[in-house]
Image (cartoon, rainbow, N blue to C red):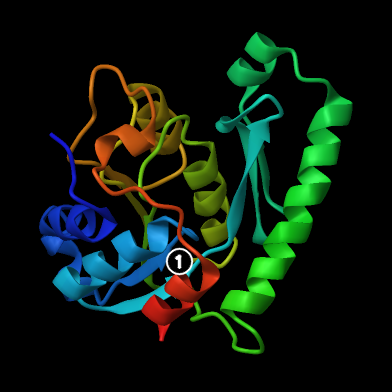
Amino acid sequence: MVYTDRTSAGRALGAHLEHLRASNPLVLGLPRGGVPVAAAVRDVIGGDLDVLLVRKLGVPWQPELAMGAIGEDGVRVLNSDVLAHTGVSQQHVAAIEARERAELERRKQVLRGDAQPIPLEGRTVVIVDDGMATGATVAAACRVARLHQPARVVAAIPVASTEAMRRVADEADEVVCPWVPRSLGGVGGAYRDFHQLGDAEVTALLC
């Protein structure tokens, strides 16, 4: 099973989320890659579309491997297994976190500007990314969402590792993922087209 692109993955994922249609969900894409998936999900199940800003903390010599993640409102999640395995020092973690906090603020200005986020309070919130390898980023997103007192937090992902599913199950009220391969070498391998999205492509989807 391989998705053509993020939009087709979102449509496939949306079919597994039809039970949320009646709740008028708030679908939150994680920039950048999660936004086209989220937009396609919203097209299927209705509701509102917005972004939730989080940033992965990648291992210095293997940036795609998440040793943790940060989010808005000061949220920080560390992947203790990855830290123990790689031996990344706390100094390295702090330096990478400072850099990613700066990028998170930059994206906040680019993607939101002066606009306020759609309120989460009392809503069924559906957090969408294009895939989960460790689950750290989606876990951080769930914690950010919880701070705003939604009625329910659903994590929805087209593809994920078994490790990530376990991690996010502790953070969300429901986790929906149609494809959990026995071995996930990397999220990009689940897509024919997994190009790097630019800010303009993301903002166009949010208009």
Q: Quadrant of residue 150?
A: bottom left
Q: Nearer the viewer, residue 142 or 83?
A: 83
The residue most toward the right is: 91
| Percent position of residue 148, x then y | 56, 67
| Percent position of residue 151, x then y | 39, 65
Query: Is residue 41 placed above or below 173 in the rendered structure?
Result: below
> Callout 1: few (<14), some (14-19), or many (20+) C-alpha neighbours within 10 Å?
some
Q: Quadrant of the N terminus?
A: top left
| Percent position of residue 97, x then y | 77, 43
Query: Going by the image, does 141 lie left or right of 22?
Result: right
Q: Quadrant of residue 90?
A: top right
Task: Give the total of numbered labels.
Answer: 1
| Percent position of residue 123, x then y | 38, 72
Q: Nearer the viewer, residue 165 or 66?
A: 66
Q: Is residue 115 visible?
A: yes
Query: Is residue 92 placed above or below 159 in the rendered structure?
Result: above
Q: Nearer the viewer, residue 32 or 160?
A: 32
State the SS at label 1: loop
Q: Amino acid at mark 1?
A: Pro
Q: Quadrant of residue 60?
A: top right
Q: Is residue 151 visible?
A: no
Query: Is residue 97 placed above or below 103 in the rendered structure?
Result: above
Q: Quadrant of the C terminus?
A: bottom left
Residue ID at (65%, 84%): 113
Query: Going by the image, does 57 lie left or right of 193?
Result: right
Residue ID at (19%, 35%): 179
Residue ID at (54%, 37%): 136
Residue ID at (24%, 41%): 177
Residue that carries the numbered disc 1 in the rendered image: 150
Query: Going by the image, does 105 lie left or right of 180?
Result: right
